[in-house]
């Protein structure tokens, strides 16, 4: 029964295996398929091992012939596998590069990412006008001390503006450990920036200071516990009420258009005299800001000589400017991000 194999048969098998292996390697479409081929051809239980196993049936002197041939084939197959693998990798890389290429000559397709909130564009317009008048930007903290928010602005200890009804006081228990334990509050107006700026910058100064302010107001159509103000301060030699009037009128007419502006006598602790300013907007007088000549007591508190330096200050609410300009009837619309509203601007 000895179905012994002949040298010729084994040599034929090797030749057939070579042809088959080369064709399969060349046709392999991916690295996984290539790995399967490698195991099938060269693995322990692979086709080449099978041929080598059968070699034992040959007479001793014939074995080296087959052995040599088999080893040559093994090397050849390994080489082909390696070459095909690099080829596949190069193709994959080229494809990836082609796919990820950025065509800088493609026509642009601009998708706007959004646009300015009406409150922001109002603020920017206000600041632009003052920048055009030679004013610089200043700012200060929203968490303030009683001193800057009130005392230094000539608002004495029992002034109604300090009332708990109006001011958010911070719980001293929540203050930063090691911080000074003076009373802390959320600033109720941007006027403290006047003081902070003058402490750090000797006159002459011309500044605008925008920012958030806080008051214990219940929310309704015209009140919000957080809103925005812009503070204006000019201090120089020889400034008088006509400069205040001219500056405020110029500003209002640039913002609202060429409409009537009137000044009414009023009272603020940090200005003397003080005025409230109205604009005639669509037939009605609307109050839009407060202003006045800086009170000498404020300057004295800062060690600035009121005989030499004088100036004016003004404060306005950004929400109010925005609402008047755009005919918005409810301040809450500015603080709730309803796209149906915002998209109209
Ligand atoms: N600080 C005032 C307020 O919040 C507004 C104001 C009035 C500011 C007159 C001023 C000013 O600088 O001169 O109501």
Image (tube, helix red, strand yellow):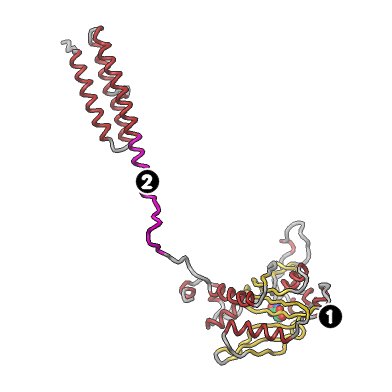
Mark 2 → mark 1, Cα distance in angstroms? 77 Å
Label total for image: 2
109 horizontally vs 296: left or right: left
Residue 230 x/y as whole percent? 65, 75
Task: Give the camera-side residue of 238 and 284.
Answer: 238
127 horizontally vs 169: left or right: left
Up/down of 330 relative to 10, above or below: below
To which residue does mark 2 refer? 96
Up/down of 174 relative to 77, above or below: below
Query: Dot 1 lies on which element?
Result: loop
* Image quarter of residue 255: bottom right
Assign the magenta stretch its main secondary structure: helix
Does the beta carbon of the residue at mark 2 sit less than 8 Å from ligand 1? no
Give the residues in magenta: 86-109
> Residue 307: which disc?
1
Outermost residue, bottom direction? 283
- Answer whether residue 200 is magenta in the image: no
Is there a contact, CB below 8 Å, between mark 2 and mark 1? no
Residue 52 x/y as whole percent? 27, 16
Q: Quadrant of the N terminus?
A: top left
Question: Which numbered disc, 2 or 1, marks the residue that appears first in the sequence?
Answer: 2
* Image quarter of residue 148: bottom right
Residue 32 x/y as whole percent? 33, 35
7 horizontally vs 175: left or right: left
Up/down of 273 relative to 217, above or below: below
């Amino acid at each position: 029964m000895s179905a012994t194999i002949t040298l010729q048969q084994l040599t034929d098998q090797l030749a057939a295996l070579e042809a088959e292996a080369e064709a399969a390697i060349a046709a392999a479409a991916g690295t996984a398929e290539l790995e399967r081929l490698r195991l099938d051809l060269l693995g322990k239980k692979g086709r080449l091992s099978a041929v080598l196993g059968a070699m034992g049936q040959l007479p001793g002197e014939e074995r080296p012939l087959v052995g040599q041939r088999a080893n040559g084939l093994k090397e050849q197959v390994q080489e082909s596998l390696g070459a095909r693998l690099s080829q596949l990798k190069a193709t994959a890389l080229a494809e990836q590069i082609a796919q990820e290429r950025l065509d800088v000559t493609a026509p642009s397709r601009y998708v706007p990412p959004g646009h300015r909130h009406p409150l922001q564009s109002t603020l920017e317009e206000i600041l632009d006008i003052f920048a055009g008048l030679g004013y610089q930007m200043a700012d200060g903290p929203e968490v303030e001390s009683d001193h800057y928010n009130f005392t230094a602005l000539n608002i004495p200890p029992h002034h109604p503006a300090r009332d708990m009804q109006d001011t958010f006081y911070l719980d001293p228990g929540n203050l930063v450990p090691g911080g000074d334990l003076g009373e802390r509050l959320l600033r109720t107006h941007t006027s403290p920036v006047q003081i902070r700026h003058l402490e750090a910058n000797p006159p002459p100064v011309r500044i605008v200071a925008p920012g958030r302010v806080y008051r214990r107001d219940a929310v309704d159509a015209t009140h919000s516990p957080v809103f925005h103000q812009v503070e204006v301060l000019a201090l120089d030699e020889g400034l008088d009420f006509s400069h205040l009037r001219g500056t405020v009128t110029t500003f209002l007419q640039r913002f609202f258009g060429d409409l009537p502006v009137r000044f009414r006598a009023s009272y603020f602790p940090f200005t003397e005299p003080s005025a409230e300013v109205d604009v005639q907007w669509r037939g009605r007088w609307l109050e839009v800001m407060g202003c006045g000549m800086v009170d000498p007591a404020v300057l004295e508190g800062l060690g600035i000589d009121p005989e030499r330096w004088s100036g004016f200050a003004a404060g306005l609410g950004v929400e109010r400017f925005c609402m008047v300009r755009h005919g918005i009837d409810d301040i809450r619309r500015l603080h709730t991000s309803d796209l149906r509203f915002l998209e109209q601007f």
